[in-house]
Amino acid sequence: MNTNAILGLPASVKSRFTVVNDLNMHILEALPPGADPSSKPPLLILLHGFPELAYSWRKVIEPLAKAGYAVVAPDQRGYGQTRQQTCKEGKIEYAEDLAPFRMLNLATDILALVYALGYTSVEAVVGHDFGSPVAAHCALIRPDVFKSVVLMSAPYTGPPGLSSAFDDPNAKSLAQQANEWLARLDPPRKHYTMYFSTPEADKEMSDPPEGLHVFLRTYYHVKSADWAPNQSVRPLAALSPQALSVLPHYYIMPSPKHAECIASYAVTASQMAKNTWLPGAELAFYVDQFAQTGFMEA
């Protein structure tokens, strides 16, 4: 199978699999033009967010390689073509065990990937969205391996405080606290990360009423610069229920189902016609991948 033709990647960007911990991890990689792989050019690791894939880096991998780097973008655990070694085909099933998705485990996946590539150091680990805290944890726990870190879209809030973890094993995270605040509003709201951690979320998002293609088209639109409200971004006035309630509905949900919140921002025909950064064929690749795996963010 000609994977590059299917993905629409430049010929210099290769797709392959490598064993990482309990995974057959799918990666996209590129070397500097004319480079001998055994020469080990400085390594860059690119970590995608949600709902994204290694494929999300397709337009920057080749330019970075031309700048002299070995560039690797993995499908992270639970995404794309990466599978547990015991799971060959079909939708990923992790039942109720979310331990594999703990941040430390995700960072360990990336450390194991570095070693699987034959490296002992990384010039920079770059994380976007949900990949940002994974990249931050990589640099935090193994600064001897990850020389530098780039965080895109999502700021790093730091590791959990030791005192709260030891003094109160039932201590709530900031997102859990925010969710409790939001539930007291009229009408009540829900924090999106709390929704994503429920068993219902994957089923509802994988089979939304408007269809997965329309759902993802709308989701990517409202996360982009094409969506008008994103052109006037400003800091929150305070960390309070009232301030959080003004955030877009895909973050602070007025509906119990995320797909319903996304549907309220339906993309018009004229907006779709202006879209040049995610053509229909490329969107179809995302739709195909998430139709196979579901939405496994935890």
Image (cartoon, helix red, strand yellow):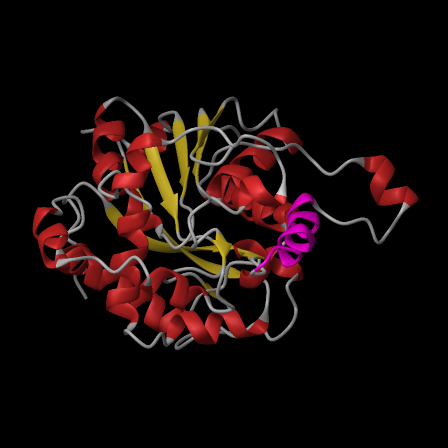
Tell me where residue 254 appears, x and y as whole percent: 49, 60
Report whether 82 appears left or right of 139: left
**x and y percent of residue 60 in the render?**
25, 35
- Which secondary structure dominates the residues rendered in magenta? helix
At 48% across and 71% down in the image, what residue appears? 202
Residue 9 on the magenta span: no
* Vertical comparison of 20 with 113: above or below: below
Which is more toward the observer, 187 or 71? 187
**Percent position (x, y) of residue 145?**
57, 28
* Residue at position x 81%, y 49% in the image: 171
Q: Point out residue 184 in the picture as x, y percentages from the top left corner.
A: 67, 56
Foreground residue among 234 and 207 = 234
Query: Image quadrant for the N terminus?
Result: bottom left
Is 179 inside the magenta-drawn segment? Answer: yes
Q: Is residue 228 above or below residue 33?
A: below
Is 79 located above or below residue 232 in the figure? below
Side of 61 relative to 84 (left or right): left
Instruction: Inspect this view and state whether residue 35 appears.
Output: no
Residue at position x 47%, y 69% from top?
257
Residue 75 can be seen in this image: yes
Q: What is the total number of numbered labels drawn onto the structure image? A: 0
Q: Which residue is painted at 71% across and 47% down in the image?
A: 173
**In this orientation, which residue lies closer to the viewer: 210 or 119?**
210
Q: Which residues are magenta?
A: 174-186
